[in-house]
Amino acid sequence: MDTEKLDDKLVSWIKDKVTAAGLNGAVFGMSGGVDSSVIAVLCYKAFKDNALGLVMPCHSIGQDEQHAISVANKFTIQTKTIVLDNTYDILVQTLSSSMDNPLNRLTLANIKARLRMITLYFYANQLGYMVIGSGNKSELATGYFTKYGDSGVDILPLGNLVKAQVRDLAIVLGISGEIIAKPPSAGLWQGQTDEGEMGLTYNELDDYLTIGKATDTIKHKIESMLSSSSHKRLTPPIPDF
């Protein structure tokens, strides 16, 4: 599909989903990455004054917040900055006091993602908005997201687009090349990158998802990730009796 036509189709799709739910706007997280920047611009084009971007630093990298604000300023997107550092610290202190062992890095990272989900739904409930997620096909297929964290959203407009397609859309939308080119990261800890954590590149992942091209090693790794994360893409099971 032509990328410019995709832009218009996604804006219309977002509008349709929000209005069909009886809601009047969109709220979304702005992390300073390419996916959330694309979502922010699409939602702004759909709702203008009824589009709200939340910048939610939680012991985050300063550059990510700067990138998020730069996107908001360029496209005149309304934002609120909610600093979650203290909330996170108190929760971690409370939870860790009940554990004999130190909390591991993944546990701590997931707390950040889930605090952001709570914050998004606070504003959604108050304003009558829908929570718009930024997960793409590459992340969804491999389970590279936090269950009930960044996956805790109402709709996923980029869910059929691999990372390369999201980058192409970002170019059409006029998002900064610096944001498009920087290594994808959830900003969960210093030096964390998506590709480093997954153990493969987005190019390798995208090639497998779009044309089935991969070395045996990469294919095995991706299929293992698909299998082990299947529960993340399903509603909680209930008995069949």
Image (tube, grey):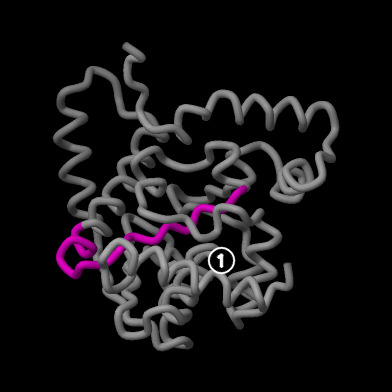
Q: Quadrant of the C terminus?
A: top left
At mark 1, the secondary structure is helix
Residue drawn at x 32%, y 67% as measured from the top left:
27
Q: Nearer the viewer, residue 102 or 28?
A: 28
Q: Nearer the viewer, residue 96 or 1?
A: 1
Residue 63, magenta (yes or no)? no
Percent across and percent down for residue 118 are: 24, 51
228 in relation to 36, above or below: above
Is residue 8 visible in the rendered image? The answer is: yes
Residue 139 location, x and y as percent?
A: 57, 45
Q: Which quadrant holds residue 154?
A: bottom left
Residue type, mark 1 in image: Val
- Residue located at (21% from left, 29% from top): 96
Question: Does the image show residue 62?
Answer: no
Q: In x, y percent, where is residue 48?
A: 37, 84
Q: Quadrant of residue 20?
A: bottom left
Quadrant the N terminus occupies? bottom right
26 relative to 109, above or below = below
The segment highlighted magenta reads 122-137
